[in-house]
């Protein structure tokens, strides 16, 4: 019986059986992961990859409960997540995969080209409610304010860098989908939202923040005030993976081709190639 089991293990190892890689987390990182998976499966055709994008917090929570191999995140770990790692004896490590700028978007027909961080903060905290308070040349129309929900790493970054962790006004519309924000801005002349720069389309207008656009150079140097790194987190409690599926995926993502795909997705590569 032991010989049969040994032969079966050898057969599986030698000839391969489809294995699964599970990736969960950030909506912002989702387009990068989609491109990576498409190319990765060409190299490893027997691998099944499942990808979910419901927010950075959901990915990190899944890493805690063991339901994902990799957690994509557009933010750093929260203090309570670090504390929880200590409490449960886990150790997650970050891998920077690229850089992003959070773009402030409005309808293309709105006669505005830039906004200050201070004004943006006042809009989202409810101190400014009408467009003519932003610029007297704009119409006295109520600003329809959209935000990602609290599970989103983009929300976390925006709250920290723009709001100084003040509460958003109760009328800010919290949505799960970045794509929904884009479509809303296209259709509504008086709406405002923020999205990862990789999601921006020609159908919306990106505002300068304090005179600075989220260009590749401005994001990489940190000159653009709402810039941030993008991460994969892995569970390295038992050490960094030196072989296997997770290691192969990470190696591909950080390779020349993987970093080219970061740029193709509309973000900024983390490593030169």
Image: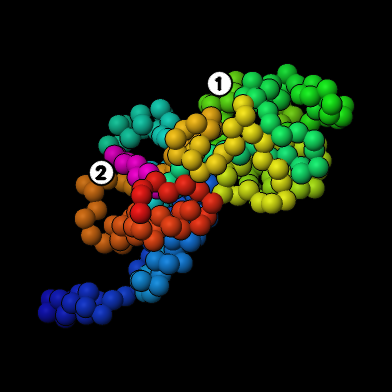
Q: Is residue 182 above or below residue 112?
A: below
Task: Give the alpha-carbon distance from disc 2 to disc 1, as whole Å.
Answer: 33 Å
Q: Which mark is residue 237?
A: 2
Residue at image point 66% right, 51% down: 201
Quarter of the image holding residue 169? top right
Which residue ends up furthest to the left in the rendered image?
3
**SS at mark 1?**
loop
Upstream in sequence: badge 2 or badge 1: 1
Give the extent of the magenta segment. Answer: 90-97
Q: Nearer the viewer, residue 179 or 20?
A: 179
Residue at image point 46% right, 43% down: 99
Residue at image point 76% right, 42% down: 107
- Does 3 sit left or right of 17 as displayed? left
Marks 1 and 2: in contact by CB < 8 Å? no
| Mark 2 neighbour density, 10 Å: few (under 14) some (14–19) many (20 or more) | few
Q: Is residue 112 above or below residue 8?
A: above
Residue 144 visible in the shown view: no
């Amino acid at each position: 019986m032991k010989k049969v089991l040994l032969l079966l293990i050898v057969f599986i190892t030698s000839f391969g059986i489809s294995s699964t890689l599970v990736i969960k987390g950030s909506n912002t990182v989702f387009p990068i992961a989609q491109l990576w998976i498409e190319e990765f499966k060409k190299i490893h055709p027997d691998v099944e990859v499942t990808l979910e994008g419901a927010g950075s917090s959901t990915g990190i929570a899944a890493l805690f409960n063991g339901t994902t191999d990799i957690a994509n995140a557009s933010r750093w770990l929260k203090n309570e997540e670090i504390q929880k790692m200590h409490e449960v004896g886990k150790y997650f490590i970050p891998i920077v995969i690229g850089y992003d700028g959070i773009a402030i978007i409005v309808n293309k027909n709105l006669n505005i080209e830039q906004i200050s961080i201070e004004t943006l903060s006042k809009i989202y905290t409810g101190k400014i409610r009408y467009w003519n308070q932003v610029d007297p040349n704009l119409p006295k129309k109520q600003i329809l304010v959209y935000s990602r929900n609290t599970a989103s790493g983009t929300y976390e970054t925006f709250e920290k860098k723009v709001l100084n962790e003040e509460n958003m006004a109760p009328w800010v519309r919290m949505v799960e989908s970045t794509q929904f924000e884009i479509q809303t801005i296209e259709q509504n002349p008086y709406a405002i939202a923020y999205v990862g720069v990789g999601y921006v389309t020609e159908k919306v207008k990106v505002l300068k923040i304090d005179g600075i656009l989220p260009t590749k150079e401005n994001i990489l140097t940190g000159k653009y005030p709402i810039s941030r790194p993008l991460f994969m987190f892995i569970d390295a409690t038992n050490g960094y993976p030196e072989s296997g599926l997770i290691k192969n995926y990470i190696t591909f993502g950080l390779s020349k081709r993987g970093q080219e795909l970061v740029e193709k997705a509309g973000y900024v590569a983390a490593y030169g190639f």
